[in-house]
Image: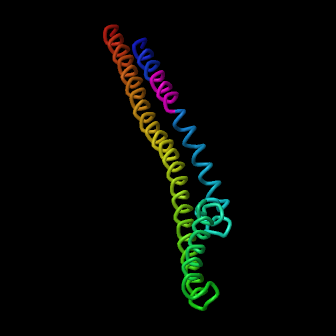
Amino acid sequence: SAAADRATSTQTDMYNQTRNDNAPYMQNGGIALSSLMGKLGSGELGGQFSPTDYLANKDPGYEFQLQQGSQALQNSQAAHDGVLSGSALKGLINYNQGMASTGYQNAYERWLQSQKNTYGQLAGVANMGANSASSLGATGAAYGKGISDTLTGAGNARAAGIIGAANATG
């Protein structure tokens, strides 16, 4: 009986230690999951690319590139047909449209990568917490079976002792 009590106590202590060891992973996983769900629910993650997102992700050098390219086109045209000629204006329009399209695509790609990074980081920590909780559940089941087996063995030993004493008395 005393051995069964010690075995049960030891297994309970081991389970509690395992719970304590896993607690930070489960807590941080829960925090990450809550943050991820909040960002998804608010549209901060998984939403549509908006003009605000474009402005937040625009290349800092975009204005400089646009200005330098336009200036180079104007200087080139000044030497040939003149800055206000039809071909000069057409070239300037084409350049500006090309820069706008490329700038928009680059901003979208930066935004999308940021979305993926944020999701990946939060999902990774949330998955770590879920894996820890799952592992702890399996460990708890194993400890529960071990304790049950110990108690069953102690009960069988007690019963055998009672039967032995009764047989001896008889």
Taking the spot 45% from the left edge, 23% from the top edge, the residue there is: 14
- Tell me: residue 147, above or below residue 92: above
Which segment did they paint magenta? 12-22
Q: Residue 21 or 14: which is nearer the viewer? A: 21
In the rendered image, residue 35, in percent from the top left (x then y), is placed at: 62, 49
Q: Residue 11 or 120: which is nearer the viewer? A: 120
Verify whether residue 46 appears in magenta.
no
In the rendered image, residue 50, in percent from the top left (x then y), is placed at: 65, 69
- Tell me: residue 112, above or below residue 78: above
Q: Residue 127 or 63: which is nearer the viewer? A: 63
Q: Quadrant of the C terminus?
A: top left
In the rendered image, residue 90, in percent from the top left (x then y), is placed at: 58, 87
In the rendered image, residue 92, in percent from the top left (x then y), is placed at: 59, 81
Verify whether residue 17 appears in magenta.
yes
Q: Quadrant of the N terminus?
A: top left
The quarter of the picture where residue 79 lies is bottom right
The quarter of the picture where residue 91 lies is bottom right
Left or right? Give the position of 26 relative to 1. right
In the rendered image, the residue lying farthest to the top is 169
- Tell me: residue 82, above or below residue 142: below
Colour scheme of this structure image? rainbow
Taking the spot 60% from the left edge, 91% from the top edge, the residue there is: 86
- Tell me: residue 6, above or below residue 111: above
Q: Main secondary structure of the magenta part?
A: helix
In the rendered image, the residue lying farthest to the front is 79
Taking the spot 42% from the left edge, 28% from the top edge, the residue there is: 148
Taking the spot 47% from the left edge, 43% from the top edge, the residue there is: 128
In the rendered image, the residue lying farthest to the bottom is 86
Tally the marks.
Answer: 0
